[in-house]
Amino acid sequence: MEKLTLDLPSSYAANKAYLESNSNEFETLVLGSSQIKDAVNPEWLDSPTLNLASGNQHHDTDFKILMSMIERLPKLNNVVLEVSYSHFELPHNGKDFWKNSLFLKYYNINCFERNTYFKDRLIYLSRPPLFSEKIYQHYILKERKTGFNSFGFDTANYHGRFKNLNYDEKKIASAKRFKINQAPNKVLFQHNVKLFYEMLDYLEAKGHNVIICTVPMYTTYHER
């Protein structure tokens, strides 16, 4: 199962190849969630850019990736950080985030906050139900289409759900959406904001430019 998992088309594998061949050239590092991952195609940018954003990736994981990568990218000048409806309102990923195995396997970044073991690099075991479904879709149903370019960006899925729904506003409005937290939690908010400012202070001390990005939201998000 591990071999089948590793052979799945993956942004992590694509990014690894891109990183290994261009680590001395990157000037810009992009961090954030899937909204940023699917929005920033490094091919379109004049500044050599590495996009390490991924789904459900919060600021604590961004910070760990940043601290690991900053010494490996000698020409790094710019860091793009995402701020969205979820970053200050939801708990951070923490040391047990299932994607930590992906970061370790493909980027050699330890987000576990402890010494790692052999099994920490086993991708299938990081989330068996998810990868079982991906394996079934890719090898049996053959319905997962991807098109990673040499910059680690999936061009086959760039246009996203709206295009799949033919931009029909009624279908878009009725489509299943991510749950948006509506219950205020002052303690959680203060904790998340504190870490974000720590990350900004870290970047200021390193002398890097910071670009804070908020991806536009569709009207149905505001209605929630």
Image (cartoon, rainbow, N blue to C red):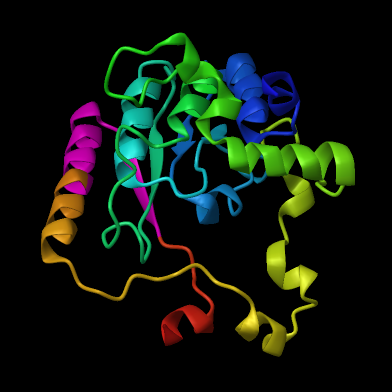
Residue most extreme to the bottom: 170
Rendered residue at 52%/43% (across/down): 54
Main SS of residues in magenta: helix
Image position of 171 with respect to 20: above or below:
below
Q: Which quadrant is home to the N terminus?
A: top right
Between 86 and 76, the one lying in front of the other is 86
Rendered residue at 36%/16% (across/down): 71
Between 82 and 103, the one lying in front of the other is 103
Image position of 219 with respect to 198: above or below:
below
Residue 129 visible to an observer of this rendering = yes
Relative horizontal placement of residue 14, taking residue 213 as reference (left or right): right
Image position of 210 with respect to 108: above or below:
below
Residue 147 visible to an observer of this rendering = no
Inspect the magenta stretch and tell me whether residue 207 lies in it: yes
Inspect the magenta stretch and tell me whether residue 183 lies in it: no
Relative horizontal placement of residue 21, taking residue 70 as reference (left or right): right
Image position of 40 with respect to 22: above or below:
below
Relative horizontal placement of residue 137, taking residue 52 as reference (left or right): right
- x, y percent for residue 61: 35, 37
Q: Which quadrant is home to the C terminus?
A: bottom left
Q: Which residues are magenta?
A: 196-213
- x, y percent for residue 85: 36, 66
- x, y percent for residue 185: 17, 66
- x, y percent for residue 223: 44, 87
Image mark count: 0
